[in-house]
Amino acid sequence: MKKYWLLLFLLMNQFGLAAQRPNIVIIVSDDHAYQTISAYGGKFMQTPNIDRIAKEGVRFNKAYVTNSICGPSRAVILTGKYSHKNGFKDNISANFNGAQNSFIKELGKVGYQTAWIGKWHLQSNPEGFSFWQVLPGQGSYYNPDFIMMNGERKRIEGYASDVVEDVAEEWLNKRDTAKPFCLVIGHKNTHRTWMPDTRDLRLFTKTQFPLPENFYDSYETRAAAAVQDMTIDKTMRMGYDLKMFENKAEEEKELSIKRMNPVQRKAYMEFYDSVNSDLKQRNLTGKALTEWKYQRYMQDYLATAASLDRNIGRTLAYLDNHQLTKNTIVIYVSDQGFYMGEHGWFDKRFMYEESFRTPMVMRYPGIIPAGSINEQLVMNLDIAPTILDAAKIQVPTDMQGKSFLPLVNRNQKKGRDAMYYHYYENGEHAVSPHFGISTGRYKLIRFYTRVEGWELFDLEKDPREMKNIYGQKGYEKITEKLKKQLLQLIKVYEDNEAEKIFTESTH
């Protein structure tokens, strides 16, 4: 009889905990720059739905990534571990080992229904989810293909952000309403080649965007920046990126165009052909052409962001309409930041602020006060342990992130003193691998392989990171202090490769 009552008590306790556990929606975009979000003070466009999450919860002003590139960032979010620990260091050679633990698997152990829908970009198929339906590789903006759980591929007519949201809502409609759920929605937007929905093609055509102050950066004192290949001037392609095709034969080579249905393609190419015709009449060269490319880049990029924000609004409306808002955590985060012409660039990868820093807003009704602004140093590494903390699940000891829930709901004022970063890929865009430390005020970076050397920045005096002050007189003490902190973090996170490079460079 005692065993019966004990079992009953344990079951009731478990059900009680389950009733308290929140639902979770994590929306992950691709390459979405915080500079373009109105909640962050961006002046380029309005993002009312991302702003709504911030207004009803918290805006993280100092959220960063451990490795600024698409697949590795997702692996970090999923596992709560640095790239060297989860095994997915870059997009060239890595395949995600789905057998390892993740916050999704921990949620599943206590009865959560879990799903990942949309962009996945981890090469292998998802493991440990109740349901998944993911884009192959980068996915397509128009009529995207999906990999299904049975291994088949299914093409769905429509625009990527709309279709991903449709599939997400379909799954929500079919879930077991007696169980808590965790849904990750992975959007392709705003990834290269920035192909807007046909309804958004003309959203920004009458807007003239100001050039960033450092658009014509000469990269003095920064050797790695000098050898990169990601400039709007030289790297951005007229056809592939900007849809300015020389002729129909060139247009036909673009698979992203060929996959459109006749109605989509007609609307799409009528617009771009008219832009191309105007460009040819202007006969631009030199800086005038580069600045024209910048304007077109901004118009297309922001138009894809408009569709992203609109579909985030659909997610929030679904929660409202199904009485799920009060008991659902919503996190919006990009896989990293992005360059909107700063340093003359597009893309990401560098530890410089525009790509290292990522937008992140979170809503948790009744727990996080509405309109909160958090100035602590937080990372995408922390999302997994935060979710488990909110779900009242013990965080596995091998997760390297820390829950930021105490920073937003328990009046804990002290977070990280410094953040560790490590970028590995030595391929596309010729960005040299590097690791480093940022305290928020100072940033110390060690480049290796392609370029060998150190960089130091005082972000208070030089927020645009234009002048490398490493080795300059007057910075000896701060450099020594930062190197000690960097080595300490390298050892804490057990990054043996970085420790070897660091040790060799200081002897």
Image (tube, rainbow, N blue to C red):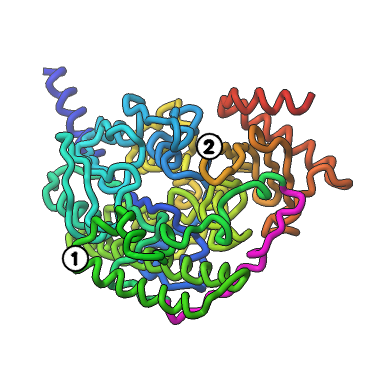
Residue 125 is left or right of residue 191, and the answer is left
Q: Residue at x 44, y 70 (%)?
A: 299
| Residue linked to disc 2 | 425
Q: Secondary structure at mark 1?
A: helix
Of labels 2 and 1, earlier in sequence is 1
Q: CA distance from mark 2 to mark 1?
A: 39 Å
Q: Please count the marks in the image.
A: 2
Q: Residues within 10 Å of mark 1 (few under 14, many from 20)?
A: few
Residue 3 is left or right of residue 288, and the answer is left
Give me the disc on residue 262.
1
Q: Which residues are magenta?
A: 205-222
Residue 440 sits above or below residue 501 on the image? below
Please check the rendered image and state whether residue 206 is part of the magenta-colored stretch, yes or no. Answer: yes
Please check the rendered image and state whether residue 139 is part of the magenta-colored stretch, yes or no. Answer: no
Question: What kind of secondary structure does the magenta stretch mostly adopt?
Answer: loop
Q: Nearer the viewer, residue 276 or 1?
A: 276
- Check the picture and name the quadrant holding the C terminus: top right
- Quick check: can you spot residue 24? no
- Check the picture and name the quadrant holding the N terminus: top left
Where residue 286 appears, as percent x and y from the top left, is: 62, 69
Q: Amino acid at mark 1?
A: Pro
Q: Which quarter of the figure has residue 448?
A: top right
Q: Residue furthest right?
A: 473
